[in-house]
Image (tube, rainbow, N blue to C red):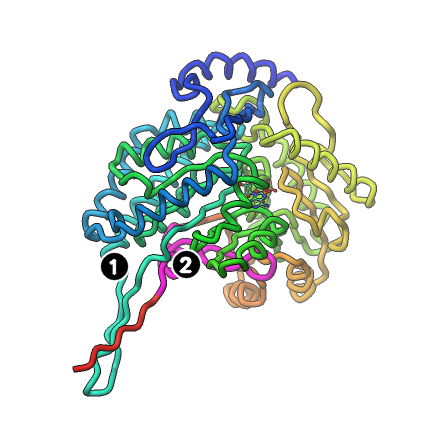
């Protein structure tokens, strides 16, 4: 692809910029110190736009997780974080937000190089979102209340809301910094200590974040960062007998493994997993808005979004016209150099993901779906996949049932409102859904009927750190965001005092 060559030139010159990358191999953060993996092993972090090695990263495994857990346990038991006054803890979280903003350009560049997402989006969405998370959760340490309970005259009963203890935070590669922060900020606000494991495809911003936490003055051992692979680093966290809680975001398949592994010590688990979200365009919708938003809803971040609106439902008599407009709008999704400000879609994160998505393109064609745009393998350097629209999709096809995690839309016809709801809900997932209509009663009726943790009406993908986020069905359980995540990172103690 022509743009890929340009991408590699620009990226080569820009990779020279962050000193952070030159200092390779990157190390693990354990007990406030940067250390090599005990095995001495490292792995490569690859730039998916050029396939070039960015740097080497320590490959942590069980032995390193054990050390990190010891450090986190020590930090927890000494109370250097949990017993720090709530006002002081809040101030520290605000300082982290300030530092994330101070280093926004560098973080955005690292994220773009490591993940392939357009640098403009990395800065405006990922990095700004990360700072916003810390600002929001900085308000929480002073607002985590227990209760005074009605009790017998001879007893004074109250509850304390206490931290969980040592938490394992396992995050995916699609929004590496943002996902790390989405878990770290509330876990810190609640007074926990933790081990953060970024995805092996995108370890860099989590490591830079570790430096920022130390610079902000987070005491040693409170946040430990272990880079490495799922089996090895991730599984050791999931199984660890001295980790009290695991918060995981990733595939449904791995979510099930995490849940099984948690049984050993009955650690608390929250899971934010996959999706196959329906985006339902009812016939009275504002079609301009519906088409343009649907394109973003499915192709943003090259479709590597758990809430991507991958199944677009359109009433049968409007179907052909809508598909035509969807196809036209998809042409505007400029694909290429993630460092160019005009790029809307970067490459997919890895060769594995590139092969997976291309395989689904073949499956879709074999199943009899009609490609209206894209649908082909892109040759040349970089893991680029063109935005693809499949028309004439049946909701029973594989491409309508399985999470592809790439820029692939399936347009599915429906008969009437009820049929749209039934087909929309006919999935093992339940992360998000959207409905487009100008009829306010219909909007609320459909929003109630959709089995999903988030429903958008006449928009797609809006989010707010103060709102809960999580799934129905096999999209997981637990709600991150807003006050609900406080429940995930705290536990309640009942105290009875004899008067
Ligand atoms: P994806 O399929 O999107 O790559 P995964 O669910 O495989 O997502 O990965 C999400 C996170 O889970 C990553 O940090 C990965 O290293 C980790 N992971 C993968 N396998 C396991 C496992 N068996 N136990 C714990 N963590 C894992």
Q: Position of residue 204 (x, y in %)?
A: 45, 29
Confirm or reject: label 1 Cβ below 8 Å from ligand 1. no
Q: CA distance from mark 1 to mark 2?
A: 15 Å
Question: In front: 111, or 26?
Answer: 26
The residue lying at 78 percent from left, 41 percent from top is 363
User: Does 49 appear in magenta?
Assistant: no
Q: Position of residue 144 (x, y in %)?
A: 27, 60
Confirm or reject: label 2 Cβ below 8 Å from ligand 1. no
Q: Position of residue 209 (x, y in %)?
A: 37, 34
Along the polypeptide, which appears first: circle 1 or circle 2?
Answer: 1
User: Does 478 appear in magenta?
Assistant: yes
321 up-or-down from 34: above or below: below
The residue lying at 48 percent from left, 34 percent from top is 227
- Which of the 4 image quarters holds residue 34? top left
The residue lying at 21 percent from left, 53 percent from top is 86
- Horizontal side of 116 relative to 17 (left or right) equals right
Residue 192 in view: yes
436 up-or-down from 220: above or below: below
Q: Which mark is residue 210?
A: none
- Residue with the most extreme left position: 499
Q: Which mark is residue 143?
A: 1
- Span colored in magenta: 465-491
- Whether tag 1 and tag 2 are in contact, CB under 8 A, the answer is no
Question: In front: 192, or 99?
Answer: 192
Residue underneath mark 2: 488
- Horizontal side of 205 relative to 249 (left or right) equals left
Mark 1 burial class by Cα count in 10 Å: few <14, some 14-19, many 20+:
few
Residue 434 in view: no
- Horizontal side of 39 relative to 126 (left or right) equals right
């Amino acid at each position: 692809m022509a743009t890929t060559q340009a991408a590699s030139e620009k990226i080569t010159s820009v990779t020279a910029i962050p000193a952070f990358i030159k200092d390779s191999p990157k190390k693990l953060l354990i007990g406030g110190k940067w250390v090599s993996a005990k095995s001495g092993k490292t792995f490569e972090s690859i730039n998916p736009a050029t396939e070039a090695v960015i740097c080497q990263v320590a490959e942590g495994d069980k032995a390193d997780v054990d050390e990190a857990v010891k450090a986190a346990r020590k930090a927890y038991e000494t109370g250097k974080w949990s017993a720090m006054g709530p006002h002081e803890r809040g101030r520290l979280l605000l300082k982290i937000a300030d530092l994330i903003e101070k280093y926004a350009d560098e973080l955005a560049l690292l994220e773009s190089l490591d993940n392939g997402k357009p640098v403009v989006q990395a800065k405006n969405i990922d990095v700004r979102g990360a700072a916003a998370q810390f600002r929001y959760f900085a308000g929480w340490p002073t607002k985590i209340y227990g209760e005074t309970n009605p009790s017998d005259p001879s007893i004074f009963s109250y509850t304390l809301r206490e931290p969980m203890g040592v938490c394992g935070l396992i995050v995916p590669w699609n929004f590496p910094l943002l996902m790390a922060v989405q878990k770290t900020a509330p876990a810190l606000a609640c007074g926990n200590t933790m081990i953060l494991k970024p995805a092996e495809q995108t370890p860099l911003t989590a490591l830079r974040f570790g430096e920022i936490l130390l610079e902000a003055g987070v005491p040693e051992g409170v946040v430990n960062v272990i880079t490495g692979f799922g089996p090895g680093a991730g599984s050791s966290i999931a199984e660890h007998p001295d980790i009290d809680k695991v918060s995981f975001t990733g595939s449904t398949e791995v979510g099930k493994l995490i849940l099984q592994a948690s049984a050993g010590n009955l650690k608390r688990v929250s899971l934010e997993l996959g999706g196959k979200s329906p985006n339902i365009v009812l016939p009275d919708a504002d079609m301009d808005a519906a088409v343009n938003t649907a394109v973003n809803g499915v192709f943003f971040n090259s479709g590597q979004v758990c809430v991507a609106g991958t199944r677009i439902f359109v009433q049968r008599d409007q179907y052909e016209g809508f598909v035509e407009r969807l196809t036209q709008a998809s042409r505007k999704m400029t694909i290429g150099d993630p460092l160019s400000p005009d790029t809307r879609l970067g490459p997919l994160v890895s060769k594995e993901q590139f092969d997976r998505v291309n395989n689904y393109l073949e499956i879709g064609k074999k199943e009899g779906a009609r490609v209206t745009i894209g649908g082909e393998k892109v040759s040349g350097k970089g893991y680029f996949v063109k935005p693809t629209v499949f028309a004439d999709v049946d909701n029973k096809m594989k491409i309508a049932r399985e999470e592809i995690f790439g820029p692939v839309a399936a347009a599915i016809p429906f008969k009437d409102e009820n049929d749209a709801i039934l087909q929309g809900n006919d999935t093992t997932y339940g992360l998000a859904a959207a409905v487009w209509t100008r009829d306010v009663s219909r909007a609320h009726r459909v929003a109630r009927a959709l089995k999903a943790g988030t429903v958008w009406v006449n928009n797609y993908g809006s989010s707010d750190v103060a709102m809960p986020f999580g799934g129905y069905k096999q999209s997981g359980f637990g709600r991150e965001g807003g006050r609900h995540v406080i429940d995930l990172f705290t536990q309640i103690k009942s105290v009875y005092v004899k008067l």
